[in-house]
Image (cartoon, grey):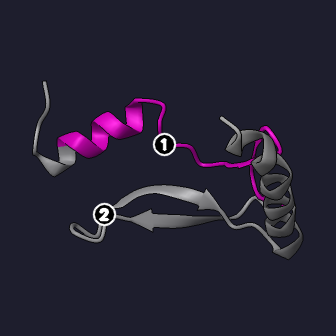
């Protein structure tokens, strides 16, 4: 059953498998090479709801390149 309670929603999302703490690059989930992460905060409550990898310049470029390479095949569907 759906709920409007922010804490319950946050908990349901975090346990659903939808939230990841990795970047999807070239078909693989990857952590930052440094192991560092950036907290993601709920702007309404200020609570930390997850994290994303703190990618360096090369890792970010790798993600961009992988997305550009995948786009032609993906856009045909």
Asked if residue 15 is among those painted magenta in the image, a careful observer would answer yes
Residue range corresponding to the magenta coloring: 8-33
Q: Position of residue 4 (x, y in %)?
A: 10, 44
Q: Is residue 9 visible?
A: yes
Indicate the secondary structure of the residue bearing disc 2. Answer: loop
- What whole-number distance in Å separates the C-alpha atoms at marks 1 and 2? 15 Å
Task: Pick whichever of labels 1 and 2 is earlier in the sequence.
Answer: 1
Q: Position of residue 46 (x, y in %)?
A: 28, 70
Q: Image check: 3 left or right of 72? A: left
Residue with the most extreme front position: 76
Q: Image check: 66 left or right of 77? A: right
Q: Which mark is residue 19?
A: 1
Q: Circle 2 is placed at which residue position?
A: 47
Task: Residue 52: name its quadrant.
Answer: bottom right
Which quadrant would the C terminus be assigned to in this image?
Answer: top right
Residue under the point 22% across and 69% down: 44
Q: Which mark is residue 57?
A: none
Depicted 72 relative to depicted 55: above or below = above
Q: Position of residue 2 (x, y in %)?
A: 14, 31
Q: Is residue 25 visible?
A: no
Residue under the point 76% across and 50% down: 71
Residue under the point 29% across and 71% down: 43
Q: Position of residue 66 (x, y in %)?
A: 84, 53
């Amino acid at each position: 059953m759906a709920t409007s309670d922010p804490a319950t929603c946050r908990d349901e999302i975090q346990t659903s498998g939808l939230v990841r703490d990795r970047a999807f690059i070239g078909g693989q989930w990857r952590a930052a090479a440094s192991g560092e992460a950036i907290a993601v905060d709920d702007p309404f409550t200020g609570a930390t709801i997850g994290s994303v990898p703190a990618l360096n310049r090369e890792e970010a470029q790798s993600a961009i390149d992988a997305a550009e390479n995948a786009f032609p095949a993906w856009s045909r569907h």
